[in-house]
Amino acid sequence: MVVQLVSTGDCTVAVAGEGYAPIGDFTDRHTSAQINNLEEYPELESLLIACAVCNDAVLQQEQQEWQILGDPTEGALLCVAGKAGIYKEQQSQLLPRTAEFPFSSERKRMSVICEVPGHSGHSGFPAAEGQQPNYLMLTKGSPELTLERCKGIIVGDRVQPLTQEMRDRILAENNNMASGGLRVLGFAYKLWENLPPEGSEETSEQDMIWLGLV
């Protein structure tokens, strides 16, 4: 299982490569240009960080062969992040996990809550003006159910209000991916000043910022 397409608020990206080896190119489908510098695509970098951090699998190399410990879908997410030089081990040190809302068949999503060292947020996940976040929640799951709980979207390095036109475009992109036989996941984030209470999934997973489709 491999990731073939990634869609953010600003771009749709084709991903090359086979198997679980974190080797492959990213191509902007709008311009056909190869993406060599993630600084020019900050919203893509944020989404790939979420792929690595909101993840319970492990990607490892043994005797020159890359293997996955855990769910194959989560393994594919680690692989696509690794192709951009984003690895779970490094990101987990920058964003140590402190809590989680495990996946459930009712919610069709999972969330991890990470500490944001320094009380200044994370450059890849913009905060609202005046907000001093201590925690970052990353969520992945059903695109439709995740999107309906979002109020904003990250475009470039800024958060914009999520309009109905944007929602319709995201859902159309999701349907287009799914009709091509791809399994699609939606990603979002939310910043907190205080750690949300245990068991507060329904209230905590609201008013999120949309990151994209994978």
Image (spheres, grey):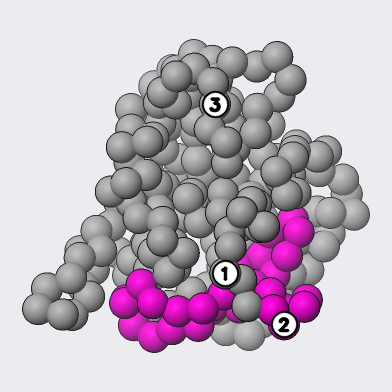
Q: In the structure shown, which secondary structural element does the residue marked by tag 1 occupy?
A: loop
Q: Residue at x 61, y 54 (%)?
A: 39
Label 1 to label 2: alpha-carbon separation = 13 Å
In the rendered image, which quarter contains the C terminus? bottom right
Q: Amino acid at mark 3?
A: Gly
Q: Is residue 13 above or below residue 47?
A: below
* Secondary structure state at the residue bearing disc 2: loop
Choose top left, top right, bottom left or bottom right for residue 69: bottom left
Instruction: State yes or no: discs 3 and 2 in contact (Cβ < 8 Å).
Output: no
- Residue 188 locus on image (x, y percent): 59, 45
Report crowding for label 2: few under 14, some 14 to 19, many 20 or more residues within 10 A (C-alpha): few
Query: Which of the two labelled residues, at mark 3 and mark 2, occupies the earlier sequence position?
Result: 2
Whether the magenta-drawn stretch holds residue 19 is answered as yes
Instruction: Determine the CA span between mark 3 and mark 2.
Output: 33 Å
Picture coordinates of residue 41, whole percent (x, y): 66, 57
Residue indicated by mark 1: 36
Residue at point 56%, 54% (across, down): 45
Of helix, strand and loop, which one carries label 3? loop
In this rendering, is residue 165 above or below 84? above
Q: Tally the numbered discs.
A: 3
Q: Indicate left or right for 188 with 157 as reference.
A: left
Q: Residue furthest left?
A: 63
Q: Which mark is residue 32?
A: 2
First reached walking from the N terminus: tag 1 or tag 3: 1
Q: Is residue 157 visible?
A: yes
